[in-house]
């Protein structure tokens, strides 16, 4: 799924409400945030989505209304950690878990710099830190972002691959419920802000995914 498709999928999931570029970036995991602005502006100019600027911030939505609908609430994140702080915490916890030093690096022919790579590339991992917790509702955009990272990790061919989540535990759990049987080569973890590492179960790997 392309970044443009991720943006449209997310806006569809929150419709008829409107979302800011920050909302979209946090939900989809598109990094860095700059491309989200370019994508929303291009889509608005092409008439694919609607947009309006209110109090120095852009809002975007998908329904047919030409006026700004109700916006998503955007409370300040409850988390005490920044993305960089979470990465550092995750690197320490996973290095201890795998008994090796993990550092950013490239593996094989995959055109991506992974956050966690062991010497020799036998262990490869990524991190996903959602500053906004999505509750119990299935979030297609988050699911697509997780699937993309799982796919990239599998393409490295490394014997050990993992994806570690912070703050939002429900998103990876719901993804595992549906698609865990398709990601048997990638281990999913949840890491608390206190450094407690939990390997997330994959019920689909045992009983089959739900529709």
Image: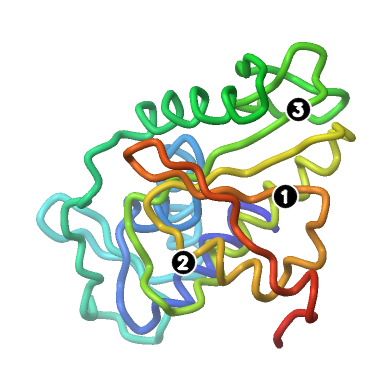
| Mark 2 or 1, closer to the camera | 2
Label drawn at residue 63: none
Crowd rating for badge 3 (residues with CA inside 10 Å; few <14, some 14–19, many 20+) = many
Q: Quadrant of the N terminus?
A: bottom right
x then y, percent, for residue 22 = 32, 51
Q: Quadrant of the C terminus?
A: bottom right
Tag 2–tag 1 contact (CB < 8 Å): no
Foreground residue among 32 and 93: 93
Circle 1 — which element?
helix
The residue depicted at 32 percent of the width and 65 percent of the height is 19
The residue depicted at 45 percent of the width and 44 percent of the height is 191
Foreground residue among 48 and 2: 2
Foreground residue among 123 and 9: 123
x then y, percent, for residue 72 = 25, 71
x then y, percent, for residue 168 = 41, 57
First reached walking from the N terminus: tag 2 or tag 1: 1
Residue that carries the numbered disc 2 in the rendered image: 170
x then y, percent, for residue 86 = 39, 33
Residue that carries the numbered disc 1 in the rendered image: 150
Circle 3 — which element?
strand
Residue that carries the numbered disc 3 in the rendered image: 123
Disc 3 from disc 2: Cα separation: 25 Å
Question: In the rendered view, would you say 43 is above or below 71?
Answer: above
Disc 2 from disc 1: Cα separation: 17 Å
């Amino acid at each position: 799924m392309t970044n443009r498709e991720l943006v449209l999928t997310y806006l569809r999931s929150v419709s008829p409400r409107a979302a800011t570029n920050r909302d979209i970036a946090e939900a989809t995991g598109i990094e860095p945030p700059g491309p989200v602005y370019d994508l929303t502006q291009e889509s608005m100019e092409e008439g694919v989505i609607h947009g309006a600027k209110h109090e120095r911030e852009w809002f975007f939505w998908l329904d047919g209304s030409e006026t700004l609908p109700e916006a998503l609430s955007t409370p300040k994140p409850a988390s005490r950690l920044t993305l960089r702080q979470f990465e550092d915490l995750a690197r320490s916890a996973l290095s201890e878990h795998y008994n090796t030093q993990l550092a950013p690096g490239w593996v094989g022919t995959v055109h991506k710099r992974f956050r966690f790579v062991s010497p020799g590339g036998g262990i490869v991992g990524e991190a996903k830190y959602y500053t906004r917790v999505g509750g119990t509702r299935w979030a297609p955009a988050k699911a697509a972002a997780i699937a993309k990272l799982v796919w990239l990790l599998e393409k490295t061919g490394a014997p050990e691959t993992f994806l570690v989540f912070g703050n939002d535990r429900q998103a990876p759990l719901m993804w595992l419920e549906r698609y865990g049987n398709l990601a048997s080569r990638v281990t999913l973890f949840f890491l608390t802000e206190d450094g407690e590492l939990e390997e997330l179960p994959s019920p689909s790997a045992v009983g089959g995914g739900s529709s």
